[in-house]
Image: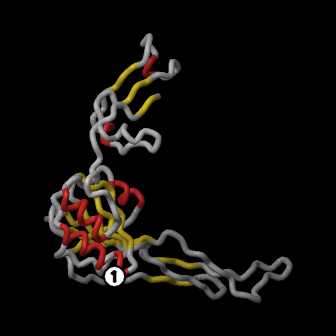
Amino acid sequence: MSRTRVLSLAILSLLSVPALGRAAEAGTPAAVPHVVVSPESLSAEQCPDTQTSQTLSLCNQGNAPLEWNLAHKPSILHLTTTDTTISVERALQELGYPYELIFDYSDWTWIDFSPYDIVLIGMNGSELVEASLEKVRTAVVDQGKRVIFVGGSCFDSFGAGVDQYLVPNDQDNHCWKMSWPPQVTVVRPTHPARARAAGPVQFPRPRGGLLPAPPHRPDAGRGGGEWGRL
């Protein structure tokens, strides 16, 4: 298991609000506040359960009172059982959301979820113990915080834990199934994939076969053949 914490604070925008009763007379500039922030951003990388302090200065260089407030982004734990560097982690980084990363494939019962507003879970299969899902329920959901699953697992322990502690599911059929090829058939004559073909073009896409069955084809995602046509 691994654990890293990266924290940052960025001053994205400040709204200067002129004081009431300071309306400008004809030909006279209105009195307005002007804020100067130093530094414009703060960041720290440190071990868990440690503290750091930095100074942020806000100065009003205008000629009217300044009203301001400071809001922080939600505290996010990204808990993962697989490599998410080019998916979830990339999205968080590009959106500018600081997060703590914990990798643990099988047991989350040791994790202290209390510092976090959002728990974002990335999974691509995992032999997760049921008690881990119970911990997510009691320490996150029941505390009024948000948990988001990206992916999941076909192991029975995960399905049973989700069913008992999070949302009901069919214990006999909780895993997505692989349909037989071809999973995609291109039938539209104007589609680029059919540019040089006289008839429909078939594509066996094993990963595509893992998609859930569409409502109008309940057999398609459970070994019932193709699930898509273009």
138 displayed left or right of 229: left
Q: Which residue is mark 1?
A: 54
208 displayed left or right of 73: left
Nearer-the-camera pick, 161 or 59: 161
Quadrant of the image occupied by residue 202: top left
Quadrant of the image occupied by residue 198: top left
Q: Is residue 54 in view?
A: yes
188 displayed left or right of 75: right
Q: Position of residue 184 (x, y in %)?
A: 38, 29
Residue at image x 56%, y 79%? 35
Mark 1 crowdedness (10 Å alpha carbons): few <14, some 14-19, many ≥20 = few
- Quadrant where the N terminus is found in the figure: bottom left
Q: Amino acid at mark 1?
A: Gln
Q: Secondary structure at mark 1?
A: loop
**What colouring style does the render use?**
secondary structure
Nearer-the-camera pick, 107 or 48: 107
Residue at image x 22%, y 61%? 158
Q: Position of residue 92 (x, y in %)?
A: 36, 60
Q: Position of residue 60 (x, y in %)?
A: 56, 84
Can you name the residue that lies furthest to the right here?
26
Q: Is residue 85 in view?
A: no
Q: Is residue 60 above or below residue 162?
A: below
Nearer-the-camera pick, 45 or 3: 3
Quadrant of the image occupied by residue 220: top left
Residue at image x 52%, y 77%? 36
Residue at image x 36%, y 31%? 226
